[in-house]
Image (cartoon, rainbow, N blue to C red):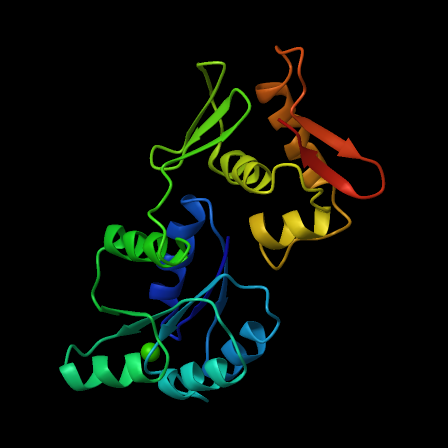
Amino acid sequence: MRILVVEDEKKIAEFVRKGLKAEGYAVDVALDGEQGRILAGTGAYDLVILDLRLPKMDGLTLCRTLRNAKFAGPILMLTARDTVKDKVLGLDSGADDYLTKPFDFEELVARVRALLRPRGAAEPTRLQAGDLVLDLLAHTAERASRPVPLTAKEFSLLEYLVRNAGRVVSRAMIAEHVWDIHFDSFTNVIDVSINHLRAKVDRDFPVKLIQTVRGRGYVLKA
Ligand code: CA
């Protein structure tokens, strides 16, 4: 899952970016409304976190602009002011949720998680592919009931593969959803991570879940 944070206060932007990264999200930051509009327009984001007061284009205008441009993902609005009028304006402009500064990081993460949950669906707490089980709340994995220790990034990568089980995912898709915009397509970071994941998930089992599709990418087959 890839998140765009549009926030001109560098300290807050960095705090949010680092925190969400640690939760396994890929995060980019735009420091003004115009940059936010351009980045969001690439269509690469699953969710946008939007500050209300921004240079070049304010949060409300940007929110409306994104909705007019058919950005369908959730938008979480941040503001320093906690008035009913501001909330109504924010929600009317197309935001899905609202958070008042200063906020607890835990609350931000809970809102983000709720917003990224498929609409109308209860949040799945487990994902399963064959004998591989991911616990999405605890961020832990088990294969054949044996724990598989993973780093946050490895967990995100495995989650992405399991969510797309049976479907070939290209390195570009993985880069877009699991890594950052600054991902350098000439590095082999994805292949290296896949190899680490294989060593942990598949090495001790006769059935190999993670498979390479030559020239196309990877597929998780249960
Ligand atoms: Ca601001």
Q: Is residue 162 left or right of residue 145?
A: right
Residue at image point 60% right, 38% down: 161
Q: Residue furthest left?
A: 83
Q: Is residue 160 above or below residue 198?
A: below
Number of dots carrying numbers: 0
Q: Give x and y (percent) for residue 92.
A: 30, 84
Q: Is residue 129 left or right of residue 187?
A: left
Q: Is residue 48 left or right of residue 42?
A: left
Q: Is residue 133 left or right of residue 107?
A: right
Q: Give x and y (percent) for residue 168.
A: 71, 42
Q: Residue furthest right?
A: 215
Q: Is residue 27 above or below residue 131?
A: below
Q: In the image shown, does 22 or 132 lie closer to the viewer?
A: 132
Q: In the rendered image, which quarter contains the C terminus?
A: top right
Q: Give x and y (percent) for residue 5.
A: 43, 66
Residue at image point 37% right, 82% down: 59
Q: Is residue 76 above or below residue 205?
A: below
Which quadrant holds residue 118? bottom left
Residue at image point 45% right, 49% down: 21
Split into quadrants, the picture shows ligand 1 in the one at bottom left
Q: In the image shown, does 216 or 131 lie closer to the viewer?
A: 131
Q: In the image shown, does 159 or 221 lie closer to the viewer?
A: 221
